[in-house]
Amino acid sequence: MRIAVLSTPFIRVPPDGYGGTELFCANLVSQLIDRGHRVTLFATGDSESPAEVKALYARGQWPPSPSHEMAHVEWAFEAIAKADEPYDIVQANSPSALLVAGDLPIPLVYTIHHARAPHLSAIYAHEPRAHYVAISERQLRLEVPLVSASVIHHGLDPAMYPPSLEPGRYVLHIGRFAFEKGTDIAIDAARNAGVPIRVAGRCHPPDKDYYETEVLPRLTGGGVELCGEANHDRKVQLLRGARALLCPIRWEEPFGLIAIEAMLCGTPVIGFARGSFPEIIDEDVTGFLVSDADEMAEAIRRAGALDRRRCASHARKRFSAARMAREYETLFESLLGGVAASAAEGGALDADASA
């Protein structure tokens, strides 16, 4: 298949630090190429990929803006339409793609990376021609009814996450410092458990008040180490050295890539039973599901007894990028079969468009 993958114009592929969608694109593209497909990645010009990279912007346009996203997507679809050799399918990760795809003569697969947002759900409800991929069953259940939808859990390259088989002395909280991520709860739970915590990440502008009132005061008093935003190598180092990763989420997390990054390293995840976490955490194997800071503190005390080799092995079976790419490949093939059948029956697409 010849596949166009549309990343965002905001962050390079793969991301240097924060960037879950861009990390997903990096893994999907690499695995599809390994499976023999020809892939073009529409991303930022500083992206690195085994695919051909096409870019409107030389570097990531941060902070995100709708105008940059729209320009990026419009430019990408124009390039797809003018390509000398037709594409078979488009996999998109920006909602603007649903607004500008128009009468695209090939299947459009759109992966939903966010929790339900009314303005985006309104777009999904009025664009039934796309096939939607949810990244968890919970995310799909909370979304508006979709005419055509699948669930495919994210996956990562296990080779990038070598396991550590000995539990560390600290617990870890990593990511955006935000109310919905529960940074304050993670610190409180670690203190209650009497275990040091390392906190890695950064505060985005909308979360400044939360950070200043709930996080900064908790950084004093000992037992808390602020590590800053971590690139991949530093992130893996922190995960491998941790007793557990703490994810006390206050929202319906659609997936949580950092959780499977930890599991692949052999580090169990202690998370609140919300969003995707009941789907991706296997109790007493890859971590624990808890409901509050007290339960999290108790789970911290028990985390060191989990078999980290078993955790890493289990995560490799469930959350490899190869498994994810196989599921996308199967989906693409099924959609192309439907297009071919429609054309054969005298549908809107001609024979060239369905090839």
Image: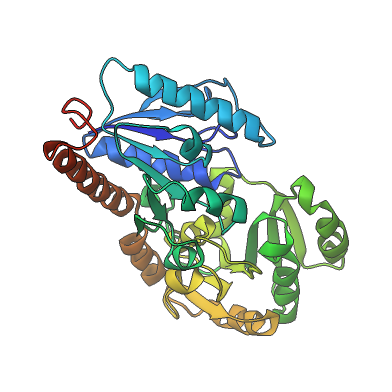
Residue shown at 23% from the left, 32% from the top: 349
329 and 117: which is toward the camera: 117
Query: Which quadrant would the N terminus be assigned to in this image?
Result: top left
Answer yes or no: is residue 168 visible.
no
251 and 277: which is toward the camera: 251
Position of residue 124 relative to residue 265, above or below, is: above
Residue shown at 44% from the left, 80% from the top: 284
Q: Where residue 229 appears, x then y in whole percent? A: 67, 46
Residue shown at 83% from the left, 64% from the top: 214
Q: Where residue 69 appears, x then y in whole percent? A: 58, 32
Q: Is residue 250 left or right of residue 333?
A: right
Q: In this view, does 223 lie to the left or right of 122?
A: right
Position of residue 125 relative to residue 75, above or below, is: below
- The residue at the far left in this view is 344
Snapshot colouring: rainbow
Query: For residue 178, which quarter of the picture?
Result: bottom right
Q: Where residue 285 appears, x then y in whole percent? A: 41, 76
Residue shown at 69% from the left, 79% from the top: 293
Q: In this view, does 248 lie to the left or right of 194?
A: left
Q: Where residue 321 appears, x then y in whole percent? A: 35, 50
Query: Which quadrant would the C terminus be assigned to in this image?
Result: top left
Query: For residue 215, which quarter of the picture?
Result: bottom right
Total marks drawn? 0
Answer yes or no: is residue 277 visible.
yes
